[in-house]
Image (cartoon, grey):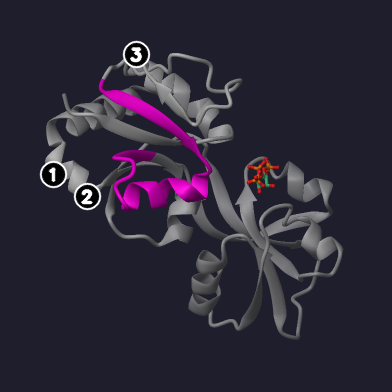
Amino acid sequence: MTQITMALTKGRILKETLPLLKQVNIEPLEDIFTSRKLVFSTTRDDLRLLVLRGSDVPTYVQFGAADIGIAGKDGLLEHQGDGYYEPVDLGIARCKLMTAVPKGAEPYRGRVRVATKYINVARKYYAQQGRQVDLIKLYGAMELAPVLDLAHEIVDIVDTGNTLKANGLEPREHIADISSRVIVNKAAMKTKYPVIKDILDALAEVVSAS
Ligand code: PRP
């Protein structure tokens, strides 16, 4: 039997992923949210689930440690990896990748400092704009950086906009629309094609029906 390993992204993407998987008859055998395990057997003997940080999902799939992954487009843009296809947009965990600045801020005239965890995306974006900026890598709580003068602006995910608002910031430039995607290791797509195609078709069908 062909064994499939599927890497999921924990956090809010996972909450929207599990109902989709359930609709294609893939269910973990125990509660992913309360367990400390990282690997889960499922209702399918030939499929196991990994639960990873979003930024690690493309890495596992790129190197074939997982055959299939579900990851946010933001992490995929940042990863800039090779070695996988991106065949299905699940349309879940939708949000936007944007720049944000203190509310009402005038354009800063000196060399702008930008705080973000999306260093590669930001580098590319500002280069396309012809703007020279200094990038500061953070791992979370980007919204704090302008408040404490660590940076003049940030690049981050905006969903409801509540986090920006609560910290006196406002969104400015739209960089990309984000949703969760299915990615597939290129070698696995060949060697495990029939099983992977069935899973992709089933997921695509659920997505188009919703
Ligand atoms: C994301 C993002 C913002 C927030 C935006 O963080 O970094 O902080 O959500 O959502 P909002 O516009 O609805 O307020 P998340 O909670 O996913 O945690 P993270 O910092 O670990 O990514």
Amino acid on which disc 3 is placed: Thr
Whether residue 108 is visible to the viewer of this picture, yes or no, is yes
Residue found at x 50% / y 27%: 16
Element at label 1 = helix
Contact between marks 1 and 2 (CB within 8 A): the answer is yes
Residue found at x 63% / y 42%: 159
Q: Which residue in the structure is indicated by mark 1?
A: 190
Amino acid on which disc 1 is placed: Lys
Q: Is residue 81 left or right of residue 172?
A: left
Residue found at x 85% / y 61%: 147
Q: Which mark is residue 99?
A: none
Q: Which residue in the structure is indicated by mark 3?
A: 43
State the extent of the magenta-drawn residues as a range: 46-69
Give the x, y percent position of residue 34.
61, 20
Q: Which residue in the structure is indicated by mark 2?
A: 186
Give the x, y percent position of residue 145.
78, 63
Q: Earlier in the sequence, mark 1 or mark 3?
A: 3
How many marks are shown on the rendered structure?
3
Q: Is residue 6 above or below residue 44?
A: below
Residue found at x 53% / y 73%: 123
Marks 1 and 2 sit apart, C-alpha to C-alpha, by: 7 Å
Amino acid on which disc 2 is placed: Lys
